[in-house]
Image: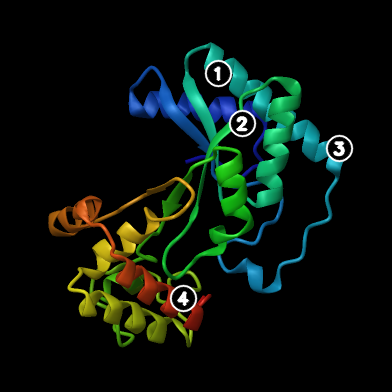
Amino acid sequence: LRPGEATTGAVLRTAVEASLRRLQTDYIDLYQLHWPNRAHYHFRQMWRYEPPKLDRAAETATMTDILSTAQALVTEGKIRAIGLSNETVWGAARWLHLADTLGLPRMATVQNEYSLLCRQFDTDWAELSVFEDMPLLAFSPLATGLLSGKYAGDVIPEGSRRSLNRDLSGRITAQVFPAVAAYLGVAARHGLDPCQMAIAFTRTRPFTTIPIIGATTLAQLGTNIGAAEVTLSQEVMDDIAETHRAYPAPY
């Protein structure tokens, strides 16, 4: 929705005001930064990740500029809170430190990928999320549809996301279909819909999680919303834990 320049305070203001016009509204409850300006380990970059060379003073100045602009936008009534997306633990800690030190708005949320197949958030991020009260907005809780079973056996249904993006942005690997089969087996053994089990799992975590669901049909939407009524038994959780040990990071 905008050119790919680095995020600054001025870019944030321009983006917010453009969003307000497109949405035809007076304010936005939560406005999130889609990416950090520096390199990160998300979207399968962790396999060869090296912390980037960083001009710490410049990074701090840019973060401060963004937070100061966020404060102005809150004061003007244009946004109510600001959050992060695709961020790292160090990045989140730095944002929070600057906000607390300078009396500027804290980052209220983080929107990172999280599912049965992608559980990077479970360690250091979990600690920060709990202790700093930064809830996770979990995107791709169905792992771009893999956990629904519709791609099981390496099929590509017509009109599916995979028909447009064959490897699902790096998620198709030698391990992913055995992992999916194992989770589908857990759901079948316990009489659960696999989509509802996967979404319900995200709500069992020790950190506050809000799963972001998506759908291309009303039937899919109904199934996904129905996950809100599903409570996973200890037996299901034990089977999920065993499967996770067998397939800790399939992509």
Element at badge 1?
helix
Q: Which residue is mark 1?
A: 73
Q: Amino acid at mark 1?
A: Leu
Q: Quadrant of residue 121?
A: bottom right
Name the disc covering residue 57, or none. Answer: 3
105, 188: nearer the viewer:
188
CB contact under 8 Å: marks 4 and 2:
no
Answer yes or no: do the residues labelled 2 and 1 have beta carbons within 8 Å? Answer: no
Amino acid at the residue labelled 3: Ala
Using the image, tell me which numbered label, if any, was put on residue 11.
2
Residue found at x 70% / y 56%? 39
Mark nearer the viewer, 1 or 4: 4
Q: Earlier in the sequence, mark 2 or mark 3?
A: 2
Between discs 1 and 4, the one toward the N terminus: 1
- Whole-percent x and y of residue 94? 73, 40
Query: Which residue lies under the disc numbered 4?
Result: 244
- From this viewpoint, which residue is outermost toward the left? 219
| Comes first in the chain, label 4 or label 2 | 2
Q: What distance separates the C-alpha of mark 2 from that of mark 1?
A: 12 Å
2 vs 1, front mark: 1
